[in-house]
Amino acid sequence: MDAAKPETDLYTHTLANTSKPQELLQVILDVIRCTYEPEVFGSWSLNGNPSFICDALGDGPSKITYSSSVMKVADDFSCQYSQLIKPTLMDQGFSPASKSTAFVIVSSHRDNLSLSLIDSLAKVLGSETNVTNVHVGQCYDKTLTGVMKVSVMVVSKY
């Protein structure tokens, strides 16, 4: 065993950008919650496949940008993306032209979450950027009636 080489990759280099530490913490907590959400739509989502994140990080040098925000259920996600999420990602160095994988975690009351909502989130991210894969997960939170918390983490290759 080579003493200079660590036994595991912690990917700490990808978290060098911590311009918004509260949002980073919220995104990480949402990833953990999504991973252990007991009720999921299916095995295809991020909920059933946390290895999607490791796969995206482990494929060469990468950078993580992130955003966590709250929106009303009735609001259009494309507006939320263009007015709040995209500028936050861009401020952290995200380039829409870079090859990226996006992870979106939506937390809300059960009545607010649907497959069509998840599909629309993925379509917005896919059409606005060079994101090659969008993985969406959901978390049920009975206290979030009328609003959704949307956490986005983008892993970009450079």
Image: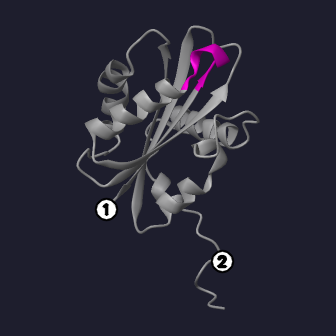
Sequence-first disc among 1 and 2: 2
Above or below: residue 91 compared with residue 51? above
Q: Mark 1 to mark 2: distance in Å?
A: 24 Å
Q: Which quarter of the figure is the N terminus placed in?
A: bottom right
Q: Quadrant of the C terminus?
A: bottom left
Label for residue 158? 1
Numbered disc 1: secondary structure: loop
- In what element is the residue under mark 2? loop
Residue 75 appears at what percent x and percent y?
41, 11
In the rendered structure, are the residues bearing label 1 and label 2 in contact, judged by CB atoms less than 8 Å apart? no
Circle on res. 7 = 2
Q: Which residues are magenta?
A: 107-114
At 65% from the left and 77% from the top, the residue drawn is 7
Per the rendering, the mark at residue 39 is: none
Q: Position of residue 157 (x, y in %)?
A: 35, 59
Q: Amino acid at mark 1?
A: Tyr
Q: Is residue 85 left or right of residue 138?
A: left
